[in-house]
Amino acid sequence: MKACEHARNVDENLAPNTSGCEECEKEGTEWVALRMCLSCGHVGCCDSSVGLHATKHFQKTSHPVMIALPDKSWKWCYVDKNYTR
């Protein structure tokens, strides 16, 4: 993992807005894994899920960094297209 300037401006202690993918819960669909936006706390499903809601959230908002839930074991920067710390 490399250092990322976008990751400097995020709060890793941010609480998730929901316990599951916000859009999947509204649509009644299932997800594979969850990702949380470190700019606003939005919880979306991963790219292995049908909805791709975490990526769609980035495309809509330009919020650059997300973290894997529930263990927060890694972060991804959509701008740099790389894992980050």
Image (tube, rainbow, N blue to C red):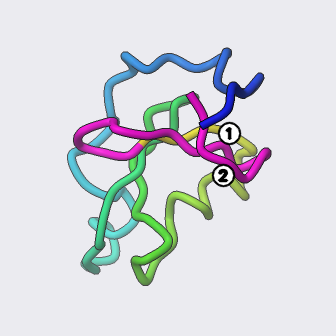
Asked whether the residues under the numbered discs 1 and 2 touch, taking CB atoms below 8 Å apart as contact, a structural biologist would say yes
Residue 75 tag number: none
Q: Does residue 32 appear left or right of residue 37 in this picture?
A: left
Residue 33 versus residue 1 in the image, above or below: below
> What segment is highlighted magenta in the picture?
68-85
Q: Nearer the viewer, residue 73 or 33?
A: 73
* Residue to which mark 2 is pinned: 58
* Residue to which mark 1 is pinned: 63
Residue 58 versus residue 50 in the image, above or below: above
**Quadrant of the image occupied by residue 60:** bottom right
Residue 49: x %, y % from top left: 40, 77
* Residue in the picture at 30% in, 45% down: 69
In three-dimensional space, the C-alpha distance between marks 1 and 2, rounded to whole angstroms, equals 5 Å
**Quadrant of the image occupied by residue 9:** top right
**Quadrant of the image occupied by residue 26:** bottom left
**Residue 79 inside the magenta-drawn segment:** yes
Label 1 sits on a secondary structure element that is loop
* Residue in the picture at 66% in, 43% down: 77
Residue 4: x %, y % from top left: 72, 28
Q: Does residue 65 appear left or right of residue 29 in this picture?
A: right
Give the mark count: 2
Q: Nearer the viewer, residue 33 or 28?
A: 33
Q: Amino acid at mark 1?
A: His
* Residue in the picture at 60% in, 35% down: 84
Label 2 sits on a secondary structure element that is helix
